[in-house]
Image (cartoon, rainbow, N blue to C red):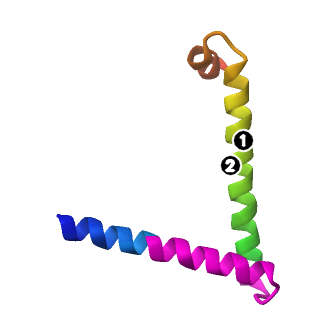
Amino acid sequence: MKHIYRFIGIVVVIIVLLGALLYFLNEKGILKGPISDWIENIRNDILSMFGHTKDMVNDMENTENPVTDSINIP
């Protein structure tokens, strides 16, 4: 079981490093075309998720019953 967790950890680290490499290559303008557009879309999606999560936490801080109020919001 230890080997499986180690393998999963190595795969995750490689994916994160590859993502960071692609991001920085795209920021330097080296990547062009569809791969650049895809990386930019992923970046915008991540920033959007961060922003929405931050807004939700701020909204929950301003209520007396954050769990109940967040469930009842349509």
Q: Is residue 74 visible?
A: no
In the image, residue 17 lies at what x, y percent? 54, 76
Q: Secondary structure at mark 2?
A: helix
| Residues at marks 1 and 2 touching, judged by CB atoms closer than 8 Å | yes
From the viewer's perspective, tell me whether residue 70 is left or right of residue 26: left
What numbered label is drawn on residue 49? 2
| Magenta span: chief secondary structure | helix
Q: Which residue appears at 69% of the width and 66% of the height?
A: 42
Amino acid type of disc 1?
Answer: His
In the image, residue 67 lies at what x, y percent? 57, 19
Label 1 crowd (10 A; few <14 / some 14-19 / many >=20): few
From the viewer's perspective, tell me whether residue 22 is left or right of residue 9: right
- Seen in the picture, residue 7 relative to 30 is either above or below; the reply is above
How far apart marks 1 and 2 lie (CA) works out to 5 Å
In the image, residue 69 lies at what x, y percent? 64, 16
Q: Secondary structure at mark 1?
A: helix
From the viewer's perspective, tell me whether residue 16 is left or right of residue 38: left
Give the total of numbered labels. 2
- The quadrant in which residue 30 appears is bottom right
Label 2 crowd (10 A; few <14 / some 14-19 / many >=20): few
Camera-side residue of 47 and 13:
13
Q: Which residue appears at 72% of the width and 28% of the height?
A: 58
Say if the magenta span includes residue 41. no
What numbered label is drawn on residue 52? 1
What segment is highlighted magenta in the picture? 13-35
What numbered label is drawn on residue 20? none
In the image, residue 74 lies at what x, y percent? 69, 24
- The quadrant in which residue 56 appears is top right
Q: Which residue appears at 72% of the width and 64% of the height?
A: 43
Q: Which residue appears at 61% of the width and 11% of the height?
A: 65
